[in-house]
Every structure is written in structure tokens, then in C-alpha cells.
Image (cartoon, rainbow, N blue to C red):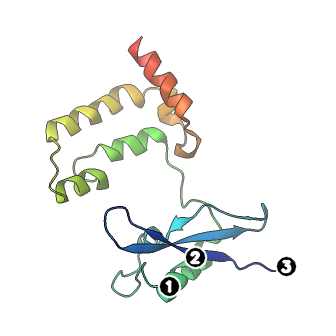
Amino acid sequence: MARFPYALYKRRSSTNARFSYYVQFWDPEGRVYLTGRSVERLRELLSLDSAMYSATKKPDSRLIAQAWLEKYGVEKRVKEIQFGDYCLQFWDWEQSSYIRALRLRGRSIGKEYVMSNHSYIKRYLIASALGDTLLSKVTSGAIESFILDFKQ
């Protein structure tokens, strides 16, 4: 039986009453649909104009999914990053989308607190084996082991 190269589905946002589309690409080797990915995120990675391609409209979402397939195929990820690099980006005052979102929502987070956590990541996590592990390979057990070793 022939399969579609992708499947679209709606997902409601937890912060408001809006929704956006997610796409699952068909993996012919594994003969399964892969884990869903946000069409909005794919649009950002493809550098498509958000005014022209909306993640809340099904025809636009189809175009984004097709553009992704043409450019990358059924790749699961664009690139793999290390856990330490991810944590450094997460605690970067200027670049972190998490910190920027907190501040835009009017929630407070201190710059010294962020810089302190960034420093801990640089000093302890980057120097460990966990910092060199690919983000997709990090498990909760590995993090727990790192924390216990750190406390000793």
C-alpha cells in the first residue's frame, strides 16, 4: 500500500486558544511515521517568510512540509548538537528564546542569575563527558548521575 510522504495534524497551544499544524514524515526504512515536528519550526529552519506561509493554515503547512522534503528529505534533524552547547545557548542572556519569552511575558528573571547558571555550565558541564554527549543521546539517568557525581 502506498503511503503519503507526510501526515499533518493540528495541535492546540497551551498558552492561548490558537493551534498550529505539526507534520509527521514517513520513514520508508522503518516503515513508520516519525515523531511530529512543528510546521512553524520547519518554516523558521527553511527561512520562509511568516507573512506568506502560516503554520495555522493547512495549505501553507502542506507547502512548508513539501519544501522541507525537497530540501532535506526525511532527515530527523538538521544537525545534532552537543548537550553542553545546548545548555550554553539556553542560559545565554542575549540569545536564549526561553529567557526572551519570559521577559516578553512580563515574568522576571535576573541577569545575574542567568549569568551564574551560564558560568556553572561552562565550568562543570562542558568539562564532563555529559557535555560532549549528543543532545538526542542524553537520558534522564545520565543527568541524574552527573548531578550525584557533582554533589559528591
At x 78%, y 65%, the residue is 31
Above or below, comparing residue 11 to residue 86 in the picture: below
| Residue visible at 36% across and 82% down in the picture | 49
- Quarter location, residue 69: bottom right
Query: Is 33 on the left-hand or right-hand side of 109?
Result: right
Residue type for callout 2: Leu
For marks 1 and 2 on the same chain, the one whose residue lies earlier in the sequence: 2
Q: Which of 123 and 109 is in front in this view?
A: 109
Which numbered disc, 3 or 2, marks the residue that appears first in the sequence? 3
Q: What residue type is labelled 3?
A: Met
Would you name the residue on which mark 3 appears? 1
Furthest toward the right, the residue is 1
Q: Distance between the residues labelled 1 and 2?
A: 8 Å
What residue sits 17% from the left and 44% below the top? 109
Secondary structure beneath dot 3 equals loop
In the foreground, 136 or 47: 136
Mark 2 residue crowding within 10 angstroms, few (<14) / some (14–19) / many (20+): some
Check contact, mark 1 vs mark 2: CB within 8 A. yes
Instruction: Specify few, some or many for label 3: CA neighbours under 10 Å numbering under 14, 14-19, or 20 or more.
Output: few
| CB under 8 Å between discs 3 and 2 | no
Q: How many marks?
A: 3
The quadrant where residue 133 appears: top right
Give residue 8's mark: 2
Q: In terms of sequence position, does the residue under pointer 1 or pointer 3 come before the other?
A: 3
Q: Please state the horizontal and vertical placement of residue 34, each as a whole percent of the image.
A: 65, 62
Mark 1 residue element: helix
Question: How far across and down, in percent of the image, does residue 143 sit?
Answer: 49, 30
Could you tell me which secondary element the residue under label 2 belongs to?
strand
Measure the C-alpha gap from mark 3 to mark 2: 19 Å
Question: Which residue bears the numbered disc 1?
Answer: 58
Name the residue at the front extreme: 17
Measured in 3D between alpha carbons, the distance from the residue under mark 1 to the one under mark 3, in whole angstroms, is 25 Å
